[in-house]
Image: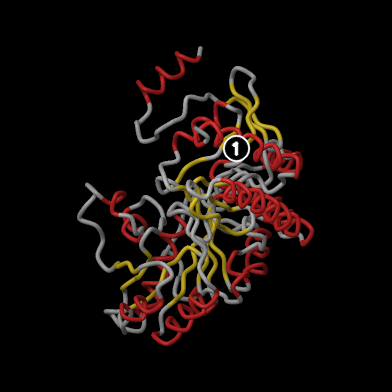
Amino acid sequence: MTHDIYQRDAQNYLAVYQRYPLILDRGEGVYLYGQDGRRYLDFLAGIAVNVLGHGYPPLVAAIAEQAGRLIHCSNLYYTAVQAEAAEKLVRLSGLGKAFFANSGAEANEGAIKLARRYGQRQSPDKYHIISATASFHGRTLATLTATGQPKYQQGFGPLPAGFSHVPYGDGAALAAAMNENTCAVLLETVQGEGGVHVPSREYLAQVRALCDGHGALLILDEIQSGVGRCGHFFAYEHFGLRPDIVTLAKGLGGGVPIGAFCARDEVAACFGPGDHGTTFGGNPLACAAANVVLDTVARPDFLNHVKAMGALLRAGLERLQARYPAHIREVRGLGLLLALELTEPGRAIVDDCLREGLIINCTAGQVLRFAPPLIVQREHIEALLEILERVLARHWQK
């Protein structure tokens, strides 16, 4: 059976993923189970997606109830579940209007379109968007161009014009790049795929001031860092500022595909009927799932739990760094989006962890990333640290 699935995948599915040799069958809480019944501790959560873990009963019940009532209808009509989800997002973000898409890339595409419409209402040349090196904003042509990693862009030219990149965290470089034709600065509040880089409060304050000074919008991509992942519902709350547009996806549906962007009223008013839209975005099934996530994750006690578990995990990772200073360059992150930057490639360690029943991943070549379900408990973190210590000892105590 295992060989058959691998063979069918190779024959029929586009070969765009470097898959691990694991066929998953089901999940429960913070655990995934392979087709052979083996249990795996999940500290990746579908790359920051399964914020409520696997099989979370209220989420399952809401999806089942909504599926029996109405799965899809056109956005030419109203639904209560979409209105409720939009109201919650607007309240949590402190912004004016929300729009639902199907993914993070779609959310960023919508934000880019809205920013350009806003800029060109001021001047026909005000369409330039500046993003950061090592960023990741999606794989559509526009979001690929905004992504500051040339390896993702190779072979897909000509790319859309009007994008440039400056080093993340370098306020002076951003100041030098901005001018009267800059319509927006697009940044991840915490860089995810680029290696889990957390900016300073001073840097983001400078970005906010530069945008205000140039009449440009600040777009914060919280597709990976939002929805409670960093200990606040929005990661930007850590830094005492508010963007003009924020984008979300990943955890928003707890595993059901949904993306969103929220914008200030003045900015949102640049879109009218027909300027943007989607067939499936904000469908009743996805919004029913999002409402459970919004009601659960935004609770103060839930967010306090994320902060406490994040501090516990970080302390454990820092102990490992103290034990292996020649191999672990840095521990960084916020909340339950944490990373170990190694002095060497990390894929072999990820592979070894998988053999030990632990799912993590490696990004940016040598950064081990930890993004567990937000319901993770102390005993799960202790189990992760025990496995990781055992694996690292095999690799480095020679």
Q: Is any atom of residue 75 visible in this view?
A: no
> Between 110 and 364, which is closer to the camera in this rendering?
364
> Between 314 and 35, which is closer to the camera in this rendering?
314
Task: Tell me which residue sits at (55%, 41%) in the image.
Answer: 46
> Between 398 and 343, which is closer to the camera in this rendering?
398
Q: Position of residue 64 (x, y in %)?
A: 70, 37
Q: Is any atom of residue 398 visible in this view?
A: yes
Give the residue pinned by disc 1. 388
> Helix or strand or loop: what does disc 1 sit on?
helix
Classify residue 114 as left or right of residue 92: left
Residue type at mark 1 is Leu
> Between 89 and 48, which is closer to the camera in this rendering?
48
Classify residue 387 as left or right of residue 114: right
Q: Position of residue 252 (x, y in %)?
A: 60, 52
Position above or below: 90 against 50: below
Q: Position of residue 374 (x, y in %)?
A: 68, 49
Position above or below: 391 against 188: above
Colouring? secondary structure
Classify residue 188 as left or right of residue 390: left
Quarter of image, res 100: bottom right
For the view shown, which residue lies furthest in the left direction?
Answer: 158
Position above or below: 306 against 46: below
Task: Tell me which residue sits at (62%, 70%) in the image.
Answer: 237
